[in-house]
Amino acid sequence: MRMLERQSALISSRAGAFCTAALLWLPLSGCLTYNGNRAIVPFFEIYDQPARPAGPGKALKSGPQEPPAPSREHVFRPFGSFEAIGEERSRLKLLWPFGDFAWGGGEERHWVLPIFYYRNRLLAPAEGSDLDWMVFPFFYGGSDPTEGSYFAFFPFGGKLRGLLAKDETHFILFPFYWRWWEKEYDSMHVLFPFFNRVRGGGHEGWRLWPFYGWYKSFKEDGAPRYEKSFIAWPFYIHDLRDMNSQRPVEIFYSFPFYGQSINPHTVTRSYFFMLFNTARDVKTGDALYFGYFLPYRFTGGQFDPWPLFGWKSRTLNTGGEFVSWDNRGIYPPGGEVLLGEKPAPAELRTRFRQFVLWPLQRYDTDQADGWEETRFWLLPLLWHFHILQKDSFQVTSEWTIWPLYRYRREGGRSTFYFPSPIWFRQENPFERQYARLWRLFLYENNPERRGWELLYGLFSRRFEKAENKSILAVFYGLLEWESSPEGQRFRVFYLPWR
């Protein structure tokens, strides 16, 4: 008797598990979302798409980039997702961006913000791997087959490689002693920032801040690059920069009274801690008046009593340098006046921007021969971006009324979301991981399909363009009506009826 009861209970439990799995699998396998994904909205969704050719989760490779591999990502909101990229690489995100783990394809890269980071990248065959890790802010370590290993326990002492944009760094009781190398460039600090000495790699100099300091840099043939010096910083500062270029700069500053910057094209002067500044073009005589402590900028093409209101209009050549032109001719910076000549439209770039109570209201246009871009902000409620590629007539346009909705059209794809409380746009991975939780209405139109979804899939509709097929679904296919050239079909509780 007890044996029969146990068998009956086992059969009942298995049947219950089977029914539960069926209830989850039937809608997932038999119904697609408005944009073609399989999902149990808003908590689970599957994305099929080409992987991004660069960025976190992709192995670093030298030489030409291979075409992106296809990927499939399973998103479990709000906990995270698992993505298979091609046949070799995988990526797991947990409460992204706090947890991110990627492996395969010649590289492992893991982080747990803000405390842990690990990366192990395979080099060429038989060369080993390049390993870096840290437990922020105390422990740092790694190894390289050619450069060796390193380890540091901050702030007590150790050695670092490839961090802080330096080849190698040594320190003891930071900031008591700190020394770094970049190729042959050697810089040593004692009681940073008070004492510093540099040498090697075309550099030499030292400082005992704030009393005195001087630095020089020169090329292999001895030609100078720069010379910098100060006495009783910041009361006397004198720099010669870009000495090996066609536009060397001389800078002098005596805080807080006077400063100047002179190059072959522009003379800039500053008075009383940058309250009053002037910049004058040597060739044209055009002057710009501006201030940093009390911001303002006034010139022939600009009027900005910041942050109240302002406007600026400029024409630049394709190299990004300012160009002024009138009926007498063109005035290229650093060149002679070319009377009667006007640059071809393809060589010019025109920009106009305007603001009122910055940053609340702003308007910006930027256009050249091949493209035109317009941006408008009325923060925090509205912003609009519009980009036109004139050769292909391809338009990228975005309208946002915060926090109500966001509409974006780019190439052959357009999307609409309501509500849209996040002011920035990053569809992958942030919006993919979380945004579906608060979006009550979604719409997408792309070359393959168009469709919409309301109230987390309570109602949805999509149209498959290639098949000329329309599907209207209630509660993810619990009730579904399909219309196509082959006829009409109904589904009730995920079972087909014709």
Image (cartoon, helix red, strand yellow):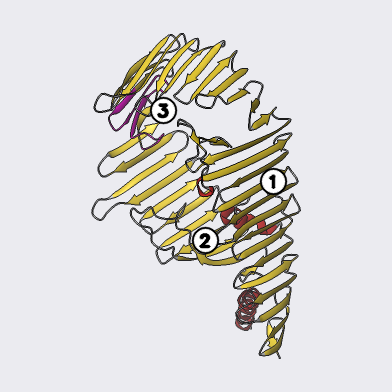
Whether residue 332 is visible here, answered yes or no, is: no
Quadrant in which residue 362 is drawn: top right
Residues packed near mark 1 inside 10 Å, few (<14), some (14 to 19) or many (20 plus): some
Q: Amino acid at mark 3?
A: Arg
Magenta run includes residue 301: no
**Closer mark to the observer between disc 3 and disc 2:** 3
In the image, what residue occupies the spot 62% across and 84% down? 4
As measured in the structure, the alpha-carbon distance from the residue carrying label 1 to the one carrying label 3 is 36 Å
As measured in the structure, the alpha-carbon distance from the residue carrying label 3 to the one carrying label 2 is 53 Å
* Residue located beneath label 2 in the image: 82
* Residue located beneath label 1 in the image: 376
Q: At numbered mark 3, what does the secondary structure look like: helix, strand or loop? A: loop
Mark 1 vs 3: CB contact within 8 A = no
Query: Looking at the image, which is closer to me, 150 or 32?
Result: 32
Q: At numbered mark 1, what does the secondary structure look like: helix, strand or loop? A: strand
Q: Quadrant of the C terminus?
A: bottom right
Residue range (magenta): 162-187
Q: Amino acid at mark 2?
A: Phe
Residue 224 pos. (x, y %) = 31, 23
With 358 as the anchor, is 93 left or right in this view?
Answer: left
Q: Amino acid at mark 1?
A: Phe
Residue 293 pos. (x, y %) = 63, 20
**Closer mark to the observer between disc 2 and disc 1:** 1
* Residue located beneath label 3 in the image: 247
Q: Choose the circle earlier in sequence order: 1 or 3.
A: 3
**Closer mark to the observer between disc 1 and disc 3:** 3
Query: Looking at the image, which is closer to me, 277 or 151?
Result: 277
Q: At numbered mark 2, what does the secondary structure look like: helix, strand or loop? A: strand
Q: Choose the circle earlier in sequence order: 2 or 1.
A: 2
As measured in the structure, the alpha-carbon distance from the residue carrying label 2 to the one carrying label 1 is 38 Å
On screen, 103 above or below 252? below
